[in-house]
Image (cartoon, grey):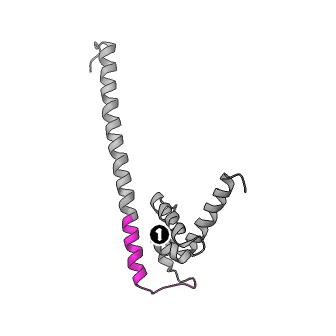
Amino acid sequence: SGPGREPVEIIYELQREKVILQTELDLAHREIQALRRRLTQVEQERMAARGSRRDGMDVMGESSATQRIQSRYWTPEEHQRFIEAIQKFGPKDVRAISNFVGTRNPTQVRTHAQKYFLRLQKEQGGK
């Protein structure tokens, strides 16, 4: 990389660097997705472990630790399980849906269902 290089050489070098950077970026995106899947798996395992110990429950039958951990957006995997659970148990059985999803408590399922059905209604023209 000296001052006497032809413009074609510079363009070729920049294109090569671009390809290398794009490849690194793609690899980083794949790693992020894998880490997100692993995080969901670990959270589900923790929830399952908490579900077997019924201590420290609040009035709604949900632990304060569960409520703290779950204050985040629903993942696509959780939403897919939510949809499957609604088809299997109906929209009103929030406890069964919660157990099926595995990472959400009944209150979170109820809230998600309300928002989901409002969005569906809005998309269908407010019927």
**Residue type at mark 1?**
Val
Q: Nearer the viewer, residue 52 or 82?
A: 82
Question: Where does residue 115 sit, x and y in percent of width and height?
Answer: 63, 62
Q: Nearer the viewer, residue 95 or 26?
A: 95
Residue 16 in the image: above or below residue 49: above
Give neighbour class at mark 1: few <14, some 14-19, many 20+ (Cα, 10 Å).
many
Question: Where does residue 77 sit, x and y in percent of width and height?
Answer: 45, 60
Specify whether 27 is left or right of 67.
Answer: left
Residue 43 in the image: above or below residue 13: below
Instruction: Give the residue displayed 50% in from the left and 71% down from the top.
Output: 104
Specify whether 21 is left or right of 81.
Answer: left
Instruction: Give the residue displayed 66% in from the left and 52% down from the top.
Output: 123
Q: Nearer the viewer, residue 63 or 110?
A: 110
In the rendered structure, which segment of residues is drawn in magenta?
41-60
Residue 87 in the image: above or below residue 33: below
On whether residue 50 falls in the magenta region, the answer is yes
On whether residue 97 falls in the magenta region, the answer is no
Looking at this rendering, what residue extends furthest in the front direction?
88
State which quadrant residue 4 falls in: top left
Figure label count: 1
Instruction: Give the residue displayed 47% in from the left and 64% down from the top.
Output: 81
Q: Nearer the viewer, residue 105 or 13?
A: 105
Residue under label 1: 101
Looking at this rendering, what residue extends furthest in the bottom direction?
55
Q: Quadrant of the N terminus?
A: top left
Residue 84 in the image: above or below residue 124: below
Question: Where does residue 76 sit, x and y in percent of width and height?
Answer: 47, 57
Q: Main secondary structure of the magenta part?
A: helix
Label 1 sits on a secondary structure element that is: helix
Question: Where does residue 33 sit, x and y in percent of width and height?
Answer: 38, 52
Q: Quadrant of the C terminus?
A: bottom right
Specify whether 3 is left or right of 62.
Answer: left
